[in-house]
Image: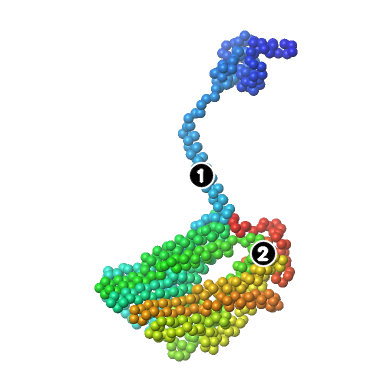
Amino acid sequence: MPETNYPYGHGDDQNRPGGGLPAHESGSNGHGEAPFSPTPSGGAFGSSVPGTTSGPSFDSAAPPTSPTSASSAAPSPWGVSAPSGPAAPSGAQGAQGAQGAQGAQALSASQAGYTLRKVGIGNPLPTFAVGVLAYIVALGAALLVIISAVLVALTADTGDLTGGGTVPTDDSASPSGDGGWRAIVGLVGLPFQLVSLASFGSYDAELNLGFFGSATMSWRGLPLLITVAMVATAFLAARLIQRRWGTGRWGSNGVLGALLWSGISGLAVAIVAVIATRVTAFAIEDDTLGLSLSMHSAGVDMFFGTWALIALPLFLGHVAGLTKPAWWPLVADLAAAPRLALVHALTFAVPVWILMAAGISIRMVVEGDGQSVLSLFLSLPIWGLTGLAMLPGLGMLAVPLHLNARGGVEDFGVERGNDFLWFFDLPWYLWIPLVLIALLMPVVVALLWNRDREIETGNILALVVSWVALPLAYFGCSAVLLALVWTTMQAEMGMVGELGISVGLAPWTPVVAFFIGLLVEVLARFGAPFVDRFVPGMLVNWFRRSARTRRADGTPSTRRPSHGHAPTGQPSHGQAPQGQAPGAPFFSGV
């Protein structure tokens, strides 16, 4: 190529800026040329342009450089700085590093919380608070039972609240006396003992009379007012917090979180209850007479009973408050059936209980024993719910009360025997209304069960659930009822020997209840549809109100009405309503 193509002559000429370097060697300017190095004096082709502070100077020639000299050139706009070692971190950089580490830790904690919420494990504090609240409410119910017992004792044989008695003025009950403080602690701890007794515990007493021997007594029977107060508080409060704050900051618990936190809450309450019950045991000792008395209800049975009576209602309350999934209507009868069994028991027992209480009171007044009527009603917190719970068994008409007295009970005016009390053993003015109401109740609850019920005829699971839900619910609820109302007393005395008394429903109660549930199911399928149109909605619409609310909110329905026609506006099988998203997943906390 001719030299005229090069502004400074031939490409290999040493007089050209950058000449003499290896051909096409890449420099710092990225154009295959060596970097320019400004010089303070003019070169062979003239000096720098005066006043120029930046930019390339094409009027000055750079001296020939080598690779080694280029790397050691002084820093300048056209020079290249040699790479230097890492500089020591300054104080600001250290602070930024610490903040970055804290931010990474916060981000990690946030990611862990998000992951736990995705699997349904959210905030445990509301569940823990509800567990404590349930136990406090049980203590309040125990105080009500104690007040009732005191009032009954004051009105016994006197008819007035003063009782006609006087308070002893000696120093035997003084706190400064021997064992006085322990007796006071035992009296203060009576609510804890009653709550323990209401949690399937047994109240044990040990009496040592020195020369006269010893005696032991054990009482097992639930004060149902305390039990119902504790269970109802745990269930209703857990359902409330799940519905209101289940997807917010204070909730986000799904099934897994509800199971975990309910179990831990019940366990914590059970541990505290055992310690409190044992510490507040009633104990009196008199070394001069060799007399000692100890009474408490702390034990393994009350520990597991408290755990179950707190944890199970908490879990069921959380589940009841969760947003139901799309497949829920297929198994909804499993949740509705226990409610129907409870409604059946209450709608029978409450009117019968009122009639029996009124009849017995009138008879006592006529016979001149009106003074005992006051004591009877003042003691309602003690025996009222237990008596109410026994009536559904009698209402089955094939279940009697089982009375068993054994041992030396004759010395206490009780006949020994193993007897059954049937409904026809009651006075005629009691058992006639009992039988009439018992025969009417299956028809009434069948109307409740039929109204707004949907059955998916093409789904095997739904068909099976629709048939077995009621019989299984009646069987299970009656088994729970059998355990709640069973009351026993056992004693062992040196001179009298062993004796025992037990009262409860007959052991075949769950079997009879199973067939009653099946009867209600048959009546709801083949009898209730013919009279359903004549029943006012205000009497039966309340039972399946939540199901109607879910359908109105657009929750997908996978079932068909039991009458064979779909409700107006219902989506087809497996589809969400147009313009609405499906319900929240059942197994997550979102």
Q: Is residue 406 visible?
A: yes
Q: Residue reaching furthest left?
A: 288
Q: Name the spot of residue 82 as percent of width and height, x first.
A: 55, 22
Q: Residue reaching furthest bottom?
A: 367
Where, quadrant-wise, is the C terminus in this rendering?
A: bottom right
Q: Marks 2/1: CA distance?
A: 44 Å
- Tag of residue 105: 1
- Colour scheme in the image? rainbow
The amino acid type, in three-letter code, at marker 2 is Arg
For image coordinates 52% across by 47% down, the residue present is 109
SS assignment at label 1: helix
Instruction: In the rendered view, tell whether residue 271 sits above or below residue 46.
Output: below
Closest to the observer: 590 or 47? Answer: 590
Q: Is residue 159 visible?
A: no
For image coordinates 53% across by 77% down, the residue present is 507
Residue that mark 2 sits on? 551
Crowd class of label 2 (few under 14; some 14 to 19; many from 20; radius 10 Å): some
Residue 464 lies in quadrant: bottom right
The amino acid type, in three-letter code, at marker 1 is Gln
Q: Name the spot of residue 439 as percent of width and height, x first.
A: 61, 82
